[in-house]
Image: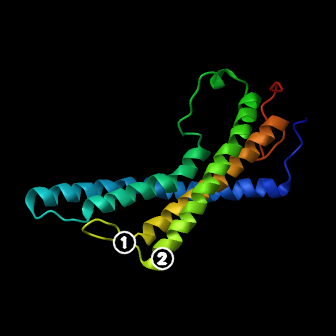
Amino acid sequence: MGDGIQMPKSVRLYVRYVDAVNRVVGRLAMYMIFAMIGLLLFSSISKTFFLPLIWTLEMAQFAMAAYYLLGGAYSMQLDAHVRMDLVYGRWSSKRQAFADSITAFCLVFYLVMLLYGGFSSTGYALQYKETSYSSWSPYMAPIKIIMTFGVALMLLQAIAIFFKDLARVTGRNIDGDPPPPGESVV
């Protein structure tokens, strides 16, 4: 397949917009680490010098969940996630893309099930005003909404990555750059 062949415009636009949204959300989520550090520092200081506050540790846990779920899609985009590599690193770019495009179906299925559970759990939390079982007893709906949103972003990014892998396998252009020259077919 030649260097000039491109993926359909709708696919290219989908990948471009999903990448752009996840880049913005991911970069904003990176700063949540400072909120977690601040919460945990405040918790330590209040426990040491004042009366311990019951909400600080659980709020830090909520911030951590939001941090890694909102940053998950950006991590996928940067290919910065953990990968078990026994032989994968020795393969050509096209062979890696072929393997990734096959495993993408498992990832998409998992994320769809997780998203279904997230919608169900969020709906329950909103309908029944669910609270945590801790002594602070905060409402669970806000963090469940954030978590479901993060899973949805990861699902959209997984599909975008599938399209990128499909483009590499077929030797097509998806983002304006020509595919690597001299790549052998899987």
Which disc number belongs to residue 126? 2
Q: Which residue is rendered at x = 50% and y = 54% of the image? A: 69
Rendering coords of residue 108 (x, y %): 67, 50
Q: Secondary structure at mark 1?
A: loop
Between 39 and 114, the one lying in front of the other is 114
Task: Residue at 65%, 52% (x, y): give it.
Answer: 157
Q: Amino acid at mark 2?
A: Leu
Residue 181 appears anywhere in the view: yes
For disc 2, the neighbor class at 10 Å (few under 14, some 14 to 19, many from 20) is some
Residue ID at (69%, 39%): 103
Residue 118: name its quadrant. Answer: bottom right
In depth, the one of 107 and 11 nearer the eye is 107
| Quarter occupied by the C terminus | top right
- Render colour scheme: rainbow
Q: Nearer the viewer, residue 79 or 100?
A: 100
Q: Foreground residue, 113 or 155?
A: 113
Q: Which residue is mark 1?
A: 131
Question: Mark 1 or mark 2, which is nearer the start of the sequence?
Answer: 2
Q: Is residue 15 above or below residue 186?
A: below
| Residue 44: mark in rendering | none
Q: Quadrant of the N terminus?
A: top right
Determine crowd level at label 1: few under 14, some 14-19, many 20+ residues with C-alpha closer than 10 A. some
Residue 114, by quadrant, is bottom right
Outermost residue on the left side: it is: 49
**For residue 183, side relative to residue 79 (left or right):** right
Residue 171 in view? no
Q: Secondary structure at mark 2?
A: helix
User: At label 1, which amino acid type do we have?
Assistant: Thr
Label 2 to label 1, Cα distance in Å?
Answer: 10 Å
Mark 2 vs 1: CB contact within 8 A: no
